[in-house]
Amino acid sequence: MLCTATTRLRYAFHKFLRFFSHYPKENAKILSSFNGIEDAVTLFNRLINIQPLPSVVQFNMILGSVVKMKHCPTAISLLKQMALKGVTPSIVTLSIWINCYCHLGEMGFAFSVLGIVFKRGYQPNNITLTTIMKGLCINGEVKKAMDFQDNVAAEGILLDEVSYGTLVNGLCKIGHTVDAFQLLQKMEEQVVKPNVVIYNMIIDNLCKVGLVTEARDLYLKILVLGINPDILTYTSLIRGFCSTGQWGEVNLLMCEMVNRNIKPNVYTFNILIDAICKKGKMIEAQGMFNLMIERGQQPDIVTFNTLMNGHCLHGNMLEARKLFDTVIEWGILHDVWSYNILIIGYCKCKWIDEAVSLFNEMHCKNMVPNIITYSSLIDGLCKSGRFSYAWELFSTINDDGPLPNVITYNILIDAFCKIQDIDTGIALFDLMFKRGLTPNVSTYNILINGYCKSKRIDEAMNLLNETHSKHLVPDSVTYNSLINGLCKSGRLSDAWELFKLMHVGGPPVDVVTYNTLLDAFCKIQHVA
């Protein structure tokens, strides 16, 4: 017969007490016997009420287990109970407390606990200090983390690679590549040298912002320093050079990987397949897929989604559907993106019934469509003239579904403007504001174009003025729509004034602008 929860807990409790003092190496095994947060809390409550109180080490083990279960608020509550009961915290206890506050974004409290560390005469270790810096970075206060690091260094405390890595990662995530690079150079001059993990962070970030040559130079530098690059180094560089179309560099990197006996992983192959698909070379992409299998790498759902997307981009919907059906044979489950890719592809090819069928299939499989799914299908339905169904879907997500975003509204506003129902478009525009959404320049362009085609030029001009008040920057599409509308309404002088505004701090004048004005002047015989 199965043990009751109470019996299991009593057994774990006695086992904990029996083994702890004699067999400290068994601690992890004992803690793993917890069946959840309830067991851990109950065991803590039993220990806290024993007289004399057990060692703080025992409490630390339970607290560590609670934090690993991601129950930081519970851990903080237990820590406060310890303080009330007079348990003297160790540096480990206080570090756990700091860690909890950092994860919850309560950095003020985290620093208060750090103050207790110093007050008790403890020397904070690298783990404690790194936790503080990581907490600041996670909560968007990278500058404060840098200042904290400077203060720590001024006190003569030597940080380790993990500490510096935390700062480098924080700087990279907010796009401060230059600052991350400067911190790297600072490390190179100190006792603690950057390791491959830190170099990888900066190489990856340089590639993401398009500075692939600089990333390559840094890679060559670590070779000179005798640091061995790993799969992450090469994968970042390969992604960077793929994005810039420098296939010669990609081939060199692949050869260097082979020479160093570093095998490309599924992520590396996915990057290569994606880049080849975007070039439209689907036969080569399939060849790379086959090579991936030969090299012993199991494709994942990202691999299949990438190939499906490649076929969809080039209108090969039958091939895309074959891949979609093949996924199950590999024992891989579809995700929302698998469906989104096909739905978008079907809509672009105007195979709306197939798109609707896939959408219904998602519901049958209890898969929740996201706003991209809904927006894509609404767009396809509108473009095929099935407004009633599109409106039904829009109403559904407003009542019970993912909230529509600006793109969703823009799709519907554009559809109504194209059938010259500008008033419904304006009603949707007003609804956006009521729902707390901020229209973008595309929204205004759609409405301005709609007003112009309906010969409501003054209202279109009012919207132009509104873009300025909303701190939006009108683009060439905005001005071209207005100039075209003004010309067709015979207001050439106003059109000319807008044309001059484009030359003075406005968007660049393009071929469309010139052609519109030339056509208008030719029609009234104002040919030079």
Image (cartoon, rainbow, N blue to C red):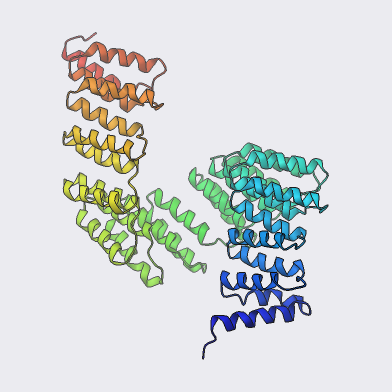
Which part of the image, by quadrant, shows the C terminus? top left
281 vs 360, left or right, is right
Whether residue 390 can be seen here: yes
Name the residue rendered at 67%, 68% in the picture. 62
Name the residue rendered at 21%, 54% in the picture. 351
Measured as percent of width and height from the top left, residue 458 is found at 23, 19
467 vs 163, left or right, is left
Residue 402 in the image: above or below residue 179: below
Residue 387 in the image: above or below residue 269: above
Measured as percent of width and height from the top left, residue 301 is found at 42, 62
Residue 304 in the image: above or below residue 417: below
Q: Nearer the viewer, residue 526 or 67?
A: 67
Task: Locate residue 143: give its quadrant.
Answer: top right
Measured as percent of width and height from the top left, residue 326 is found at 35, 68
Measured as percent of width and height from the top left, residue 156 is found at 83, 44
Q: Nearer the viewer, residue 227 or 83?
A: 83
Task: Locate residue 40: give its quadrant.
Answer: bottom right
Q: Nearer the viewer, residue 436 or 304?
A: 436
Residue 134 in the image: above or below residue 486: below
